[in-house]
Amino acid sequence: MAQKKAAGASRAARRRRWWNLRQRWRMLGVFEINPEHEFYQLTSMIKEGMHASLQTPVELPGQNALTTEHFEAEETQAHEGFVMQTFAAPVFAKLRGSLNLTEEEYMKSLCSEGCYLQFVSNSKSKADFFVTNDKRFFLKTQSRREVRFLLSNLQAYMDHLEKYPHSLLVRFLGIHRIVIPTQMKKYFIVMQSVFYPDERINIRYDIKGCEVGRWTNPDKGGKQTIKVLKDNNFEGQCIELGQEKSWFANQVKVDAAFLRELNVLDYSLLLARQPLHQDELEGKHSLANLVIRTTNSKAVSSGVTMACFLRNTVPSWWAQWSLHRNVCGLG
């Protein structure tokens, strides 16, 4: 009997250690924005403003029914201590719908009682990055110039995603502005976390296709910083795409051509490596479908996969063509 109790206690201790390890891994690179945090007031305003904005009925455009009026739409809502403005709401509502993301799911994640998380990486970006408590969406502060650029090219962006639904470009889900008396206006964008859920990801690379200055010391930085490696760190490795090679190469070419048309000169490919699930090992999912897949099966098995997404790094507005470096973001 004593041996059974000891064995049970040992198993319980192992489960606790494993749970604690998973919790520490889950919070790697993020810090809870609690009431003592410098961004608590701002993120609380964002959550309150987003909740009110998403409660406002939006007339969803029908198929191919987006008009200039939809792209130029602005909604202003006054709150205690601040004003929230939402840009092109019908356009982004349609985009969220195309991703099978309901407004209820979107609001539940962005407006939950759980605190937002501050995302921290070795990126050089000066923007602030926040993550919803469930880590499903990223929010990134933007300058007025960056927001103007994005809005002026929003129709081209929507046309591109409609033509190429498996594009490697990140999905922008909303553009907003917080106006606080006696303070600077705060612009921010909401983006889909393309690596959600990220518990299996064990390494990330930001690939630009050049070697100068493209090395990151894997051992440098704090333990709570998401480390994003670069081209020279990737040297000697390869990705086996199999039958997906031609599709992938063509999609990168198409997306890069789109960025060039917008005079975006500097962009990169974000890679993430993680253990494969059993259905992934069996080839039940194409790479194209994995690009936009947002749910995971349960059966984890051996092996690794590389998920790849384009991200732009120069006009930091076109943030997070991929995610997870600034995640979202630009560097």
Image (tube, rainbow, N blue to C red):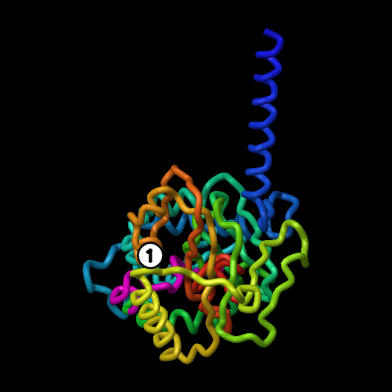
- The quadrant of the rendering that contains the C terminus is bottom right
User: In the image, 100: left or right of 13?
Assistant: left
Q: Is residue 86 above or below residue 133?
A: below
Residue 137 screen position, x and y as percent: 51, 59
Task: Give the residue displayed 58% in from the left and 68% down from the top.
Answer: 140
Q: Residue 294, relative to residue 271: is it above or below? A: above
Tell me which amino acid carries mark 1. Leu
317 and 24: which is toward the camera: 24
Residue 25 on image: x %, y % = 65, 49
- Mark 1 is surrounded, within 10 Å at the Cα level, by few (under 14), some (14 to 19) or many (20 or more) other residues, namely many
The residue where tag 1 is placed is 287
* Residue at the spot 37% in from the left edge and 78% down from the top edge: 251
Which element is circle 1 on? helix
Query: Is residue 163 on the magenta stretch?
Result: yes
With 102 as the anchor, is 115 left or right in this view?
Answer: right
Determine whether 248 is above or below 46 in the image: below
Q: Is residue 296 magenta?
A: no
Residue pushed farthest front? 236
Q: Which quadrant of the structure image shows residue 177?
A: bottom right
Q: Residue furthest top?
A: 1
Report the span colored magenta. 160-178
Residue at 54%, 81% in the rendered image = 146
| Image quadrant containing the N terminus | top right
Would residue 294 be found to the left or right of residue 44 on screen? left
Q: Identify the residue at horizontal 23%, vertical 73% (top origin).
A: 65
Question: Percent from the top left, x then y, of residue 19?
Answer: 64, 37
Quadrant in the rendering for residue 319: bottom right
